[in-house]
Amino acid sequence: MSVTVLGAGAFGTALAISLAGRGAVRLWARDLGHVLEMNATRRNERRLPGAPFPDDLTVIDDLATIPDTETILLAVPMQQLRRTLQAHGPVLAGRRLVACCKGIERGSGLGPVAVISQTLPSAVPALLSGPSFAADIASGLPTALTLACEDAETGAELQADLSTANLRLYRTTDVIGTELGGALKNVIAIACGAVIGAGLGESARAALMTRGYAEMQRMALALGARAETLAGLSGFGDLALTCTSNLSRNYRLGLSIGREEEFDRSITVEGAATALAVTEKAAKMKLDMPITDCVTGFVNQSLTLPEAMAQLLARPLKEE
Ligand SMILES: NC(=O)C1=CN([C@@H]2O[C@H](COP(=O)(O)OP(=O)(O)OC[C@H]3O[C@@H](n4cnc5c(N)ncnc54)[C@H](O)[C@@H]3O)[C@@H](O)[C@H]2O)C=CC1
Ligand SMILES: O=C(CO)COP(=O)(O)O
């Protein structure tokens, strides 16, 4: 098996480093200057500092050079996925494409696998998701992720091909459940960061994680996901990691909201655009997603944290 990773961000680079332990891996970046820099230093100091490249990792700037049989990992942010697929359609069509992004696309309300299927119907799409920080994977720390593919046979092949000594993959055919787990947990992580940033306490965070999980299940089950997928790595697992770690960019955006500090807008924070997409989708589906709606309010600056807390606490009392 040979693999090309499309997108030399933190996650794509970490996956390329980990997979290079098993054989030849190509890492493609769109910016020629970045490619030359990585080839010269054998590192990606822009996105994943301090992680040296193994010998089996080659950095490339031309996707036309990759073999026809190659599996491609798509490691670009969710809102960039469609234009990436469109830009490289002729090279990507008909291949096994593993999305590595977490989010719901604005406008369409679709997750990564659905966007691939819609844009390149001849491709065989899959999704890699679950609790993992790029730096942990690149340092060889143990990590477990979910590999979702509607076609069970292809899923089993990808599971075997993409597992490494430290990266343990579990497989599922529940693509929609995996998509939604990875997307929605980022929104809840922003909310958790905000309560911690504002000094509202660990108990409030635990309440948000739990009620946030209820929102994740509400939308996922309504769209046909299996409850056990949400309870797995790509749902509960990633929710636990992202809502409790300063390494998470979503959580850190939340912290800055709670502390009323500026946040660097160039940082990839998938939960921000996803909150807007999910609020829209939930309204169409007539689903109650109060925590997600608060995060949408923070993102479009129509709601402050004190207003959000007052709103959540004033909701009618109900059964759990
Ligand atoms: N960083 C992490 O620890 C993890 C990230 N992920 C997911 O991986 C995805 C990517 O995140 P990161 O790599 O962390 O982001 P990043 O901000 O480090 O890198 C994003 C990369 O995508 C490239 N890119 C953006 N638009 C592009 C386009 N149109 N065509 C080609 N390349 C383009 C950028 O040049 C950049 O190299 C996100 O969906 C994130 O949720 C998942 C698990 C862990
Ligand atoms: O998805 C992640 C951990 O599983 C990475 O989280 P952030 O995108 O919030 O940094």
Image (cartoon, helix red, strand yellow):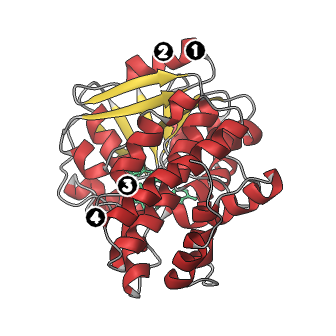
Which amino acid type corresponds to the residue marked 2 in the rendered image?
Ala
**Against 161, is 77 above or below?**
below
Q: Position of residue 309 (x, y in %)?
A: 52, 76
Q: Which residue is mark 1?
A: 152
Q: Which residue is mark 2?
A: 156
Q: Earlier in the sequence, mark 3 or mark 2?
A: 2
Inter-mark Cα distance, 2 to 1: 6 Å
Q: Which mark is residue 57?
A: none
Inter-mark Cα distance, 3 to 4: 8 Å
Q: Is mark 3 within 8 Å of ligand 2?
A: yes
Judged from the image, the secondary structure of the residue bearing numbered disc 4 is loop
Label 4 Cα crowd, 10 Å radius (few <14 / some 14-19 / many 20+): some
Q: Which mark is residue 246?
A: 4
Q: Residue at x 48, y 15 (%)?
A: 156
Of the two numbered discs 4 and 1 in the rendering, the one whose residue sits closer to the viewer: 4
Q: Earlier in the sequence, mark 1 or mark 3?
A: 1
Which amino acid type corresponds to the residue marked 1 in the rendered image?
Ala
* Quadrant of residue 119 within the rendered picture: top right
Q: Earlier in the sequence, mark 4 or mark 1?
A: 1
Q: Position of residue 214 (x, y in %)?
A: 56, 47
Q: Residue at x 39, y 69 (%)?
A: 193
Q: Which residue is mark 3?
A: 242
Q: Earlier in the sequence, mark 4 or mark 2?
A: 2
Q: Residue at x 47, y 28 (%)?
A: 147
Inter-mark Cα distance, 1 to 3: 29 Å
The answer to whether the residue labelled 3 contacts the one labelled 2, judged by CB atoms less than 8 Å apart, is: no
Q: Position of residue 77 (x, y in %)?
A: 52, 56
